Amino acid sequence: MESTRDIKGRIKSVTNIQQITKAMKMVAAARLRKAEEKANGSRPYAEKIGELLRRASSVTPGFTSPLLATRPVKKVGYLIISSDKGLAGAYNSNVMKRTIQEISGKDPASYSIYMCGKQGRNFLKFRGYELASYHFGFSDKPSAQDSIDIAKEMVKYFVDEDVDEVYLIYTKFITALRQQVRCDRLLPIETPDDGAAEGAAEESAASDEYMFLPDANKVLSKLLPEYVQVQVYNAMLQSAASELGSRMAAMSAATDNATERIADLNLTYNKARQAQVTNEISEIVGGAAALE
């Protein structure tokens, strides 16, 4: 059995860890509220951009753009959003599992990886995967400028035909305890089919008419890059909220485990102390009996 001194040292160590995990849980919970508000606030704007895209497409059937170009897929780009920091439960591992699922068994020349986040980079580098680009420093607090820079980079790769499709792998925030890893096509932008276009035209006719100034073609030309940026920014906000939610849940579980461990160590300490006292009493009684 361990000495009481060793057990007291272990209790102190676990107590210190408990204080750290509790503080991290509180910080994550406080930041989660703001991140959740931003993630939920971006959805109406993203939906409205999509609605405008459908309406503008319905009145410009002959419109063409490099961002709408579909071509034989020879190379696919994957924009992956992970976190810069660890201690977030299964958040990063779930993103990486989906990434490996997408690229496993494929020729490395048939895909490019664009990584956001240090944890994802470390995971793929350790396994020998090459990265075409790497961004970090904003996983839990993304800004609009970060998404603009990344969206421009993805558009450039696609327009220059370095890749024929771009997919976005990120984590959709549902609740603090529930997130879902998604793999959505970012480029080329999916335009509504004929049936959807007719439905959008009927919807437009049934409601107030939209007036596109100077004309629908120019509005659509400006709208398409904006749509890409909004999709990237929305994915970054969703991932940031998911990261903080996972970290809060992980730190909460760690704090609870530390509490249970401290209780077990206190019980072990009391047993060891009791055994030590009993042994000392036995030695005193034995010594007294020897003197008689």
Image (tube, helix red, strand yellow):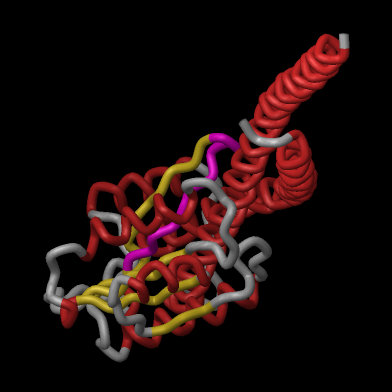
Residue 21 position, x and y percent, is 72, 45
Q: Residue at x 64, y 77 (%)?
A: 145
Q: Is residue 203 above or below residue 59?
A: above
Q: Is 236 placed above or below 68 here?
A: above
Residue shown at the point (23%, 73%) measured from the top left: 76
Q: Quadrant of residue 54?
A: bottom left
Question: For the point 66% across and 31% down, which residue is it?
Answer: 261
Q: Can residue 175 be found in the magenta stretch?
A: yes
Residue at horizontal 38 percent and vertical 44 percent from the top:
202
Q: Quadrant of the N terminus?
A: top right
> Dividing the picture into quarters, in which one does residue 124 lie?
bottom left
Residue most toward the front?
292
120 and 188: which is toward the camera: 120
Q: Nearer the viewer, residue 5 or 22?
A: 5
Quarter of the image with the C terminus is: top right
Outermost bottom residue: 160
Magenta stretch, residue numbers: 167-177
* Residue 247 as seen in the image, left or right of residue 49: right
